[in-house]
Image (tube, rainbow, N blue to C red):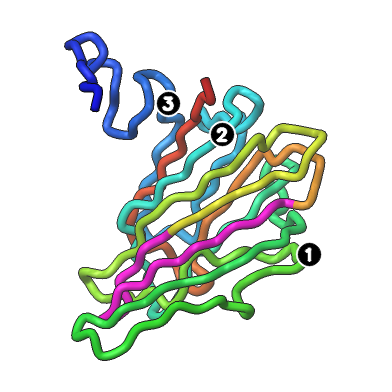
Amino acid sequence: MALVKYNNNSLSAITSTGLTAGAMTLIKSQTASSSATISFVHGTSDVVLDGTYPIYLFKFINCHPSNNTVGLYFNGSTDGGSNYNVTKTTTYFLVRHQEDASSNELSYKTDLDLAQSTGFQPLSIDQVNDNDASVCGFLHLYNPSNTTFVKHFISRTQESRNVSSMENYVGGYFNTTSAINAIQFKFNSGNIDAGTIKLYGIKDS
């Protein structure tokens, strides 16, 4: 078996994300404080969401709802955030495990996927508003400014739901060849009491 050798120069070019230095750039960080929504609109407040990067990454860090048993939702816009109503087709499945191992679940959620719908897509479900509970995760959005193809996205979130761990997997596409130039996040009821959402741009080479 061949041994792989590293020198200090090669190690310094590696980041904790596994990408070479400079491949992922933080564009905007927003912290909620009883916020109804958090929006990232291209050209507003230093937000870049165009052809500068082929891949955009949103990170959700300890997003805590003001209401109980709610989910984190998102939608896109083609008109700079005037409307968040882009047609989507999506899939949704989840895994769950109780703290005492009394029950578990692996299921496809037909009530949480969308079929050519303009509604907001859930990224999590049944998040509680206990003081120590929150939802964390990420959403990848691919080539949002491309005017030839539909716009694909993939999300994975982890939430603490009472006495269980819940992980949610969502994938789908905005069924439009128009550029997606704004993304909005919200809980489906009440405010985002606390938490941070960060937007990164990722170079593919």
Residue 25 among those drawn in magenta = no
- 202 to the left or right of 112: left
Tell me the element at label 2: strand
Residue ID for mark 3: 25
Residue ID for mark 1: 116
Which residue is located at x 30 percent, y 73 percent? Answer: 165
Tell me the element at label 3: strand
Marks 1/2: CA distance? 23 Å
Marks 1/3: CA distance? 32 Å
Instruction: Give x and y (percent) for residue 127.
Output: 38, 74
Which residue is located at x 45 percent, y 34 percent? Answer: 200
Tell me the element at label 1: strand
The quarter of the picture where residue 149 lies is top right
**Circle 3: is it few (<14), some (14-19), or many (20+) Cα within 10 Å?**
some
- 104 to the left or right of 99: right
Instruction: Give x and y (percent) for residue 22.
Output: 39, 19
Q: Earlier in the sequence, mark 1 or mark 2?
A: 2
**Circle 1: is it few (<14), some (14-19), or many (20+) Cα within 10 Å?**
some
- 153 to the left or right of 168: right
Residue 168 among those drawn in magenta = yes
Q: Quarter holding the N terminus? A: top left
In contact (CB < 8 Å): disc 1 and disc 3: no
Range drawn in magenta = 157-174
Badge 1 amino acid: Gln
Instruction: Give x and y (percent) for residue 60.
Output: 39, 52
Residue closer to the observer: 111 or 20 = 20
Residue ID for mark 2: 55
Badge 2 amino acid: Ile
Which residue is located at x 51 percent, y 24 percent? Answer: 203
Instruction: Give x and y (percent) for residue 5.
Output: 20, 16
Residue closer to the observer: 108 or 147 = 108
Marks 2/3: CA distance? 11 Å
